[in-house]
């Protein structure tokens, strides 16, 4: 009897020790709250949400700071943020589920499922595969066609995808990494065609509901009405300000497959657990097979590696590449899988270390990549047992250098006008109807000697034109958050008629790709 009591005591003590050890391992890095608060202050980020998962458990899901400048409403683990391009991993996962079900293959030509789909090159049209839609090597230039997506246009998703045929290819097919959003819209249309469900419905029913991501939205349009949602903020004229009207200008539902999901720290932890556990949700429901994880994380398109400043040498990558909706790179000896997202005042980053069963997500409401990397590397260092490092100071130095470069570039782009310059044509002759085959109709109207420019299919793009010099005006967009001010140049024939209009952005961080705009009069010149 005495022996059995001793044995029972030893077993109880051992269980208590194991439990205490497990609890200790499940604590976030010591002093993390203070570190995050310091980082947010350093980068002038009003609020953030941070999640950590380790070995299949949520270690941290917490909010920091405030949702909106001027308020005291705190961010919590349920506060929704736009995760922007982190949505791409959900689109890739949706395709992977359909591939498992035999409804498509990664190497299927897109036109097998979307017969109406066209690129500007017939060879690329016939050879572009489902996999090619996701890896940014189609030959399109970087961010091609984005001005129909951000801010939103009045075109439907299908109408935008049909316009891809109008976008010229700048690179040879499958040779060059050039990030695009628009082919993810094509992926969304493909999902709808194959599954019989809209992209939004498929992601909600087949991914979010099964993963227990109950608060995550697959429609950007639902974000505005949510009770617990963050505002967005950006740096404009060196000052961090609220992006007014973000929910009207940020993104339309047409662009959801590329960047329309809204989520929070708690739900994103569930997403990372599912990805790290080869498709098994926290409740062990199978969302997809382990072989699918290999497909999603396998690098298809190598990406350029930039050389870090000396202060960020520890984060220098040795490899970097794009997989299916994810990026893969190294931090030291460890492989990291993740993605970032950025959209008009929201930036986010997911970083998962499969070897450690570790995942970190940072969602912020200000455009500061340095803030989220400072937090992520600090957390990774703890779990990798790396020496402590002041990432916040290092990334702040990088930001300061970047701001100096931006200011210098802005000065270079700002041309001093000729004193006393006079318009070669009467102002009213610049008014009229114009069109761009991709961006749609543009109206320039005249009222009491002043011109206004309106992109009819892009409601946020309204600008007042001020005469500059020669045949040029400056377009001052009424929505200052777009940083869209641009030179607008009119081509005039020998008869004195307008034959074309081009634009050039002044601000180096403009949200618009105005250089792509090529307007011609809706009523051509009579010869």
Image: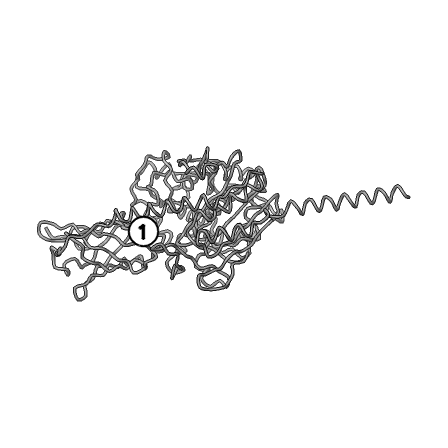
Is residue 111 shown above or below 451? above
Single out the residue that lies furthest toward the right: 1
In the image, residue 202 lies at what x, y percent? Answer: 49, 51
Looking at the rendered structure, the number of numbered marks drawn on it comes to 1
In the image, residue 369 lies at what x, y percent? Answer: 43, 47
Is residue 373 shown above or below 79? above
Dot 1: what SS? loop
Q: Can residue 154 be seen?
A: no
* Left or right of 167 in this view: 318: right
- Disc 1 designates what residue? 512
Q: Nearer the viewer, residue 145 or 5?
A: 5
Single out the residue that lies furthest toward the left: 495
Kindly identify the residue that appears in the image at 11 percent across and 49 percent down.
493
Q: Which of 525 and 21 is in front in this view?
A: 21
In the image, residue 500 lies at what x, y percent? Answer: 18, 50
Q: How is the image coloured?
A: one colour
Kindly identify the residue that appears in the image at 39 percent across and 58 percent down.
241
In the image, residue 182 lies at what x, y percent? Answer: 37, 47
Q: Can residue 134 be seen?
A: yes
* Left or right of 458 in this view: 89: right
How many other residues sit within 10 Å of disc 1, few (<14), some (14-19) or many (≥20)? many
Is residue 99 shown above or below 265? above
Name the quadrant of the N terminus. top right
Q: Nearer the viewer, residue 451 or 109?
A: 451
Single out the residue that lies furthest toward the bottom: 448
């Amino acid at each position: 009897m005495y022996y059995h009591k001793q044995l029972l005591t030893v077993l109880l003590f051992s269980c208590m020790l194991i439990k205490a050890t497990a609890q200790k391992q499940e604590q976030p890095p010591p002093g993390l709250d203070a570190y995050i608060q310091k980082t947010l202050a350093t980068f002038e980020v009003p609020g953030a949400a941070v999640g950590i998962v380790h070995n299949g458990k949520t270690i941290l899901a917490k909010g920091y700071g405030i949702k909106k400048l001027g308020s005291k409403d705190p961010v919590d683990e349920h506060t929704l943020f736009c995760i922007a391009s982190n949505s791409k991993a959900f689109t890739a996962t949706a395709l992977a589920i359909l591939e498992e079900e035999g409804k498509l293959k990664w190497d299927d030509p897109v036109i097998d499922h979307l017969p109406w789909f066209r690129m500007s090159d017939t060879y690329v049209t016939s050879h572009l595969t489902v996999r090619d839609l996701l890896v940014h090597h189609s030959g399109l230039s970087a961010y091609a066609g984005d001005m129909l997506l951000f801010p939103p246009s009045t075109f439907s998703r299908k109408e935008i995808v049909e316009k891809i045929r109008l976008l010229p290819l700048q690179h040879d097919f499958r040779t060059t990494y050039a990030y695009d959003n628009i082919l993810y819209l094509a992926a969304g249309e493909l999902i709808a065609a194959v599954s019989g469900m809209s992209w939004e419905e498929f992601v909600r029913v087949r991914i979010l509901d099964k993963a227990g991501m109950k608060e995550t939205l697959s429609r950007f349009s639902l974000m505005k009405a949510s009770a617990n949602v963050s505002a967005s903020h950006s740096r404009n004229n060196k000052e961090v300000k609220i992006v007014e009207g973000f929910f009207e200008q940020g993104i339309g539902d047409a662009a959801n497959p590329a960047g329309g999901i809204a989520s929070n720290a708690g739900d994103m932890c569930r997403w990372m657990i599912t990805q790290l556990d080869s498709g098994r949700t926290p409740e062990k429901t199978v969302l997809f097979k382990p072989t699918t994880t290999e497909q999603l994380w396998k690098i298809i398109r190598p990406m350029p590696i930039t050389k870090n400043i000396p202060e960020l040498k520890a984060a220098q990558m040795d490899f970097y590449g794009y997989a299916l909706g994810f990026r893969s790179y190294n931090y030291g000896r460890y492989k990291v899988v993740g993605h970032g997202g950025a959209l008009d005042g929201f930036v986010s980053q997911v970083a998962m270390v499969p070897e450690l069963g570790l995942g970190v997500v940072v969602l912020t409401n200000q455009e500061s990549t340095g803030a989220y990397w400072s937090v992520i590397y600090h957390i990774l260092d703890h779990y990798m047992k790396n020496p402590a490092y002041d990432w916040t100071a290092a990334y702040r130095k990088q930001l300061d250098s970047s701001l100096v470069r931006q200011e210098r570039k802005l000065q270079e782009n700002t041309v001093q006008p000729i004193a006393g310059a006079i318009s070669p044509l009467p102002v009213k002759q610049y008014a009229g109807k114009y069109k761009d085959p991709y961006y749609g109709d543009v109206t320039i109207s005249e009222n009491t000697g002043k011109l206004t420019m309106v992109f009819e299919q892009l409601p946020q793009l309204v600008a007042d034109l001020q005469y500059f010099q020669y045949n040029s005006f400056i377009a001052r967009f009424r929505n200052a958050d777009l940083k869209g001010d641009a030179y607008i140049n009119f081509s005039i024939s020998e008869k004195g008629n307008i034959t074309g209009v081009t634009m050039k952005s002044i601000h180096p961080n403009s949200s618009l790709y105005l250089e792509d705009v090529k307007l011609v009069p809706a009523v051509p010149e009579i010869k």
